[in-house]
Image (cartoon, grey):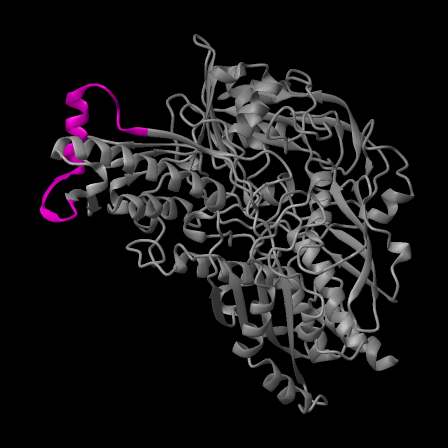
Amino acid sequence: MDHTYTYIGRDAPVNDAAAKATGQLAYAADLHLPGMLYMKLLLSPVAHGLVRSLDTSAALALPGVAAVLSFQNTPSVKYNRGRVRATDEAPDQETLFTDHVRFVGDRIAAVVAQTPEIAQQAVSLLRADIQPLPPVFNLAQALEGAPVPLHERDDIIHLPVVSYGDYASAQGEEFCHHTATQRVSHIAMETHCAVADYTPATGRMTVWTATQSVFGVRSAISTILDLPMSRIRVIKTPMGGSFGCKQEMILEPLAACAAKMTGRPVMLHFSRSEVMLCTMLKHPLESDIKVKFSPQRTITGLQLHCRLDAGAYQTVSPDYAGSISKKLSWVYNIPHMEYYGTTVCTNTPTTGSYRGWGGPEAAIIMENMMNAAARHFSMDPIELRLRNILPPYAISRINNFSLGNLPLEDALLLGRERFAWEERKARLAVQDRSGRYARGIGMALSTHTSGYFPRKGDWGTVVVKMEEDGSVCVNCNVHDHGCGEVAVFKAIVGEVLSISPELVDLPEGDTAYNALDNGCYTSRSIYVLGRAILDASKKLLEQLRRNAGELLGCLPEQLSHKDGRFFVTKQPQRGCTYSQVAYYVADKGTEALFVAHTHIPVSNPGPVAAHFAEVEVDTYTGLCQVIDYLAVHDVGKALNPALCRGQVGSALQQGMGLVFCEELKLDPKTGRALNADLQRYHVARAYDLPNLDVLFLEKPDEEGPFGAKSVGESCYVPVAPALIAAVNDALDLELSTLPLDPAHILSALDDKQAQ
C-alpha cells in the first residue's frame, strides 16, 4: 500500500548539522574538566620482546607529572577489547599494559600530567629495557609455527567447520579461485578520545567517549577495575565517524584506570599515527574457494578456506571469521557448503571490526569467484548470477530463518537496464586495446544483515515521553556514527505523532538512563531500535488519544490527529492540543504520559545491493579511474533518501580506497609501520569519485519501521568486487590480490606481455 508521509521519505539533514557547521558541537576532545590530566602512552619500539626493566624515575621527577602507569602498578586482568558483555565467548589475551610486547605499538606504560606536552616529554624519559624475541609478520610464517608463541594459548584458532550437505558428493565442474586483501585503516575523521572522571568519595566513575557501545565500555571497565556497574556511567559523545574502529573498548579502560589511580579527570586522545598503530585495522585475508558448477552453470557445491591475520591479539577475529561463513549463502542457492575459518596471531597491529563485519569479505570472495567463473565459462556475469540467485523469502540454510522479500532478480534486471550494460559491453568490445587507456565494466551482487537475529539475542528498549508543552523526549541507546540515525529516529516519532521532529529530543547512549542494549553495529540501529521507537510512539499516541477523548467527552475512536492536535473527525473545529491533553493528565493525577517498550525482532531481511562500475586504466602509469558507477539498493523504504545516498557515496569512496590505494605497510624485517600518517597513507579523495547513480528499490519489509531495512553497511559490501571486475575486464586479467595500485597493475601487465 502506498502512503503519503510528512517526514518519512523526505530529505533532511542530520540532527546536529548546524552545530557541526558552526563549530559548536563538542566532541570528547573538546571536554575541559576542572583539574583534568592528560595521558600519553609509551609504545613498544620492537615487534616482539620481553620488558626486563622499566625505569620511571626521571619521568616522575618531571614537574607536572601526576603518575606513571605500567604493567608494574595496574591490574593484570586479561580481557578482550571486543567483549560487549562478560558472557561473550572471546579469547582473553590483552592487559592494560604488558611486559611481553607483541607488536610495534604495544602498550608498555603511560604518563598522566597537567598538560599533553608535559606528558609527552615524560614519556620520552621512560626507559624500557626490552629483550627481543623472534617475530612472525604474516599468515604463512605463523601457520608454519612461531619460534616463540605470542600467547599462552589461542595464537591460532581453527573455527569449527561450518557445513551443510556434502561437498564431496556434489556433481559438476570444479572451479577454484584465490582472493587476498591487505591491512587498511578506517580513517575516521575524528581520532579516538576518551575522558574518565573518578570520585574517590563516592566510588563513582564517569566516562565520555565516542563509542558504539556504552554498555560494552561499562562492562570492560567493571571487569578490569573491579568496580560495580551501578557506579560506572558511560556517556556517548558526538562521533566523527567510526566504520567499526570505535566498536572495541581500547582507550576507555586506560583513561578509567588513570582516573581511579589519581582521583582526577583524565583525557586520552590519540594522534592519527596512534590510531593507525594502536586501535584496530581491517584484516589481511587469504582465501581459497572451490565451487562446483553443473553443465547448466548452476552451483552444486562450495568449499572455502579462509584465513584472517588477527595481528597481535585475537580480539574479535574468531567471531569475524565466523560471520563470513553465515553470509556466504545469502545470495546464491548453494546446496552443499563447507567453510573452514582460521584466525592467526602475528606480531603486527591488531585487526578487527570494520564496516560490514564479514559481509564485504564474503562478497569479495564470492563475487570475485563469480566474475572469474563467468569469464571461464564465457558467460555474461549477470546471466550467471540469474541462474543461481535465491528466490524471495528463501530460508537461510544456516540458522534457518527467512531472508525476507530478497529482490535479487529485480536488482540485477533494473541495474542491467539502468547501467545500459549490454550497450556498454558492445562499445567496449570494439575498443582499441593497443593504446594507452583501456576501459572495462564490472558488477557485483550482495546482501547483508539488518540485525543479530537469530544469531544471538537482540532487542531494543525505549521510553517515549510527552512533556506538558507537547514536546517529546525519547530515551534510546542510540550511537549515531555521524550518518544520521538520530535524525531518522526523530522523523519516526514526528511521523507517528504528527509533530515536527524539531519537537523531539533524543539524547544518545548513556548507561545511567538507557536500558541495557547490544550497541549500534550489525546494522541493527534502524531495524531494531527504529522499530522499537515506532511501536512506542504508537502506544503513546493511543494513550494521548484515550485522554483526549476524556477531555473532549467523546470516544477515542472518534478522534483524528494532525500537527500536534486531536480533533473530532466529523467536527474538526472541536479539538485540543497535545499540550492541553498533557496538562489534563497531570492535573488528573492518575498516570504519566510515557511508554516503555521493548521490541524483540523475529526477522532479519537481507538488504540486496547490485553495483555496476566502469573503470579506465592508464596502462602507462597503472593508475585506475572510476568513470561511472551505479548502485541499486533494496532499502525496504528510504526513511531519509539524502542520508541513504550519502551512505552509498561514502561506501564507494571507501571501497575505491581499499581496491586502488590503501594499505598500511609494514617493514618486513622489523614490523614497523612505514606509512602510519596521512602524508604517506593514500586514500580515495572526493576528487576521485565518479558520476554516481543511486537507485533505491523500495519493497517494504513486513517488520521494519515503515518497511525499512538497513543500508549503512550493505552499501559497502559489493563495492570492491565490482571495481575489481571492471579492472579485469579492461585489462583482460585475473587480478584478485589487493590493492590494485599502480605497481601491482604494471607488474601484472609486464607478466602478461612476457607470456
Q: Return the residue nearer the eye: 285 or 511.
A: 511
Q: Measuring 23% from the left and 40% from the top, which residue is drawn there? A: 557
| Quarter of the image where one finds residue 553 | top left
* 754 over 578 or under it: above or below: below
* 219 over 395 or under it: above or below: above
Report if residue 114 is visible in the image.
no
Q: Position of residue 67 (x, y in %)?
A: 55, 18
| Quarter of the image where one finds residue 91 | top right
Residue 582 is inside the magenta segment:
yes
Q: Return the residue nearer the eye: 699 or 721.
A: 699
How many numbered callouts?
A: 0
| Left or right: 644 in relation to 490 | right
Highlighted range, magenta: 568-594
| Left or right: 139 in relation to 437 | right
Q: Return the residue nearer the eye: 556 or 281.
A: 556
| Left or right: 309 in relation to 3 | right
Q: Position of residue 159 (x, y in %)?
A: 80, 40
